Image: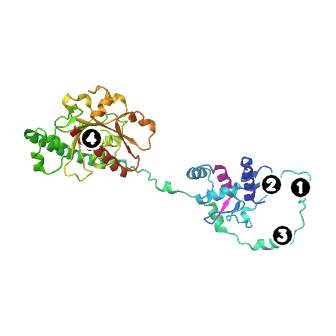
Amino acid sequence: MDPLSVLREYAIRGELDRVVQSGDELRFGSEYAFPCSAVTAYRSKQGGFYTLDALLFFARHHHLKHTEYLQSARQYRLPTVTFPDRKPLLDYLLGRIASSDAVSFLPPPPSATVEEYRPDDPSIPLDEPPSSAPATAADEAAADLAPTAPVDYVAMIRALERPLKDREALLECRNRDFHAVLLASTKREEERQRLESQQRKDGLVAKTRLIGSDDHHRPVVAAYGGGGDDAADAAAPKPKIHLKGSKIGEGVPIILVPSAFQTLITIHNVKEFLEDGVFVPTDVKVKAMRGPKPDCVTVQKKLSRDRAVAAYEVRDKPSAFKPEDWDRVVAVFVLGKEWQFKDWPYKDHVEIFNKIIGFFVRFEDDSVESAKTVKQWNVKIISISKHKRHQDRAAALEVWDRLEEFMRSRSHN
């Protein structure tokens, strides 16, 4: 009996645990024994025939992922089954299909001669071969053809080949670390944005003071991006902005962010998110940061072609606020914890989110439990992807749109 048929029979019966290796042989119970490297009749789609030890190992480990299976086979220095052959081979070995085009029962090469193993049988003399049935005409014809059947030596060689590297191993770069490149580029970008932020802040403060001396309401309109003809805007009376009975203080509006690192948006990465539409993890920004953490960051809307651009201050230390600072707070990125609002000049979160617009930024595949508390508040939940950075711009624009809508609605109160 050929080794492939024996292996298939044991696999169908679920008796592969009865196959044991003894030296260079694989013994199937007490019935058969074959060389471990015996070439079977199953041909790979790559052209070679699989050896018996390769098929047995695959049959025992087919439940593993292909990469895990390859690694495990290499540890035992065994030939492996290719990925395209996995399913059709498994279906044939487990009897899900009766036959396969990949099976080609050719006469085995001399190096893979099958030796049948039989237990001791006292009824058969050791010095006499067992009697056999008379040969039929078909047997004699097959015997005449056997010596002339070609042996595929190339297939035999390919069956014994073992891959040294897979596509994952080829991508590995030993003694190479690109973290330093990331840090260097991040530092340069941080320095550029810091200089730009300082220049914008200095110009904004000077402009606010100059306009404030002539028109008490003009800084509010400039800060919130009022449009229209400049001369008409200057001549027309400007409405005084209130937040549910509490006016917005003069100067630049304030956006609050949590100081805790377990939130996605912090004072470290808020500028990249709101101005550039790119989410950079806080830990990456902290590693690239030079000097102490800033107390204030100025952000402007750069993601649209609006003629007038709003400017906001972002802070994360409300405990240091003066009463007039609270009058300028218009938005807050929430952490999702009640203790974030401790010592705020409001009685509860209902009053907070009536006077201040709230945002909660989360990863889109986070569990619902992470936003369970936030869903009870009057805040806008903004979802971003963990890996698809091209989607960050849409999330940042949603924040700006909600904020500007909130500012317009309050200006009419």
**Relative to 59, residue 348 above or below:** above
Q: Which residue is mark 3?
A: 139
Within-10-Å neighbours for mark 3: few <14, some 14–19, many 20+: few
Position of residue 17 measured from the top left corner of the image (x, y, whole percent): 72, 46
Question: Extreme left residue here?
Answer: 214
Within-10-Å neighbours for mark 4: few <14, some 14–19, many 20+: some
**Left or right of residue 284: residue 227:** left
Magenta residue span: 48-61
Residue, x 64% and y 49% (percent of image)? 61
Residue 248 seen by the camera? yes
Q: Earlier in the sequence, mark 1 or mark 4?
A: 1
Task: Name the amino acid, label 2.
Answer: Tyr
**Relative to 34, residue 362 above or below:** above
Q: Which residue is mark 4?
A: 406
Q: CA distance from mark 4 to mark 2?
A: 86 Å
Task: Name the amino acid, label 3.
Answer: Asp
Q: Which residue is mark 1?
A: 126
Q: Earlier in the sequence, mark 4 or mark 3?
A: 3
Q: Main secondary structure of the magenta part?
A: helix
Q: Earlier in the sequence, mark 1 or mark 3?
A: 1
Position of residue 101 measured from the top left corner of the image (x, y, whole percent): 68, 65
Q: Which marked residue is nearer to the observer: mark 3 or mark 2?
A: 3
Q: CA distance from mark 4 to mark 3?
A: 93 Å
Q: Which residue is mark 2?
A: 117
300 in the magenta segment: no
Q: Are marks 1 and 3 in contact (CB under 8 Å)?
A: no
Residue closer to the observer: 269 or 139: 269
Q: Are marks 1 and 4 in contact (CB under 8 Å)?
A: no
